[in-house]
Amino acid sequence: MEASFQNKICVATILGAVLFAELSIPSIDHPLGSDWGHYFTVAEYLWHPNPDIGYPDFRKPWFGWLMGALGEGSTYLDAAQFLGRASALTMIVCSGILAWALAGRWSGGVAAWVMAGLPLVLDGALWVNHYPLLGAAIGLAFAAGAAASRWRGWWWVTLSAAGAGASLVLD
């Protein structure tokens, strides 16, 4: 089989895993995850400053700012669940890229499907805290770093640095 055709099959396999995960994540109307109330408070404090609201000093503001920015048009819960869902799907893609870069294209497809089937990833897609986004940022840093060592391109290095920087500011 031609290499470019095999690459297309692998990309389709990874995207199939993402689609499977997207369809497997339920829609719920309540927050899940640890300390979710703190993140709502951070978003409220950053987007609607009020001296009556105490900022939890041990929380870094980036996730709360992002959740507030996305949630101003709808709700903070919808924004946080969107971030969790997007983060879970990003982790699936990053696991496929990481395995592909380290062990070959077929292992990338297998890794993406394994990640899409992990209950923690699917549950984490509904968490209303920074941990899914942190996992996606770390996954991006590792996957792009491994890809940079296998394939040429400064954009892999840039993606890796962006993922590492995002994980630093998240937690």
Image (cartoon, rainbow, N blue to C red):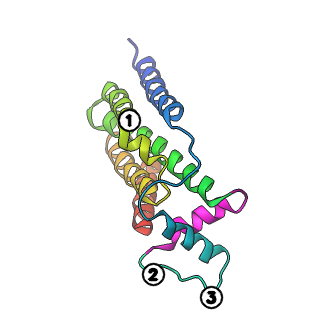
- Mark seen at residue 129: none
Residue 85 lies, in percent from the top left, at 52, 45
Q: Are marks 2 and 1 in contact (CB under 8 Å)?
A: no
Report the amino acid beneath label 3. Answer: Pro
Q: Which mark is residue 51?
A: 3
Which residue occupies 52% across, 81% down? 55
Q: What is the distance, in whole Å, between disc 2 and disc 1 at their CAs?
A: 36 Å
Q: Residue at x 48, y 26 (%)?
A: 16
Q: Earlier in the sequence, mark 1 or mark 3?
A: 3
Q: Is residue 62 left or right of residue 105?
A: right
Quarter of the figure that contains the N terminus: top left
Query: Label 1, label 3: how many angstroms apart (C-alpha)?
Result: 46 Å
- Numbered mark located on residue 96 in the image: 1
Q: Mark 2 or 1 closer to N-term?
A: 2
109 on left or right of 31: left
The residue nearer to you, when weighing 165 against 30, is: 30
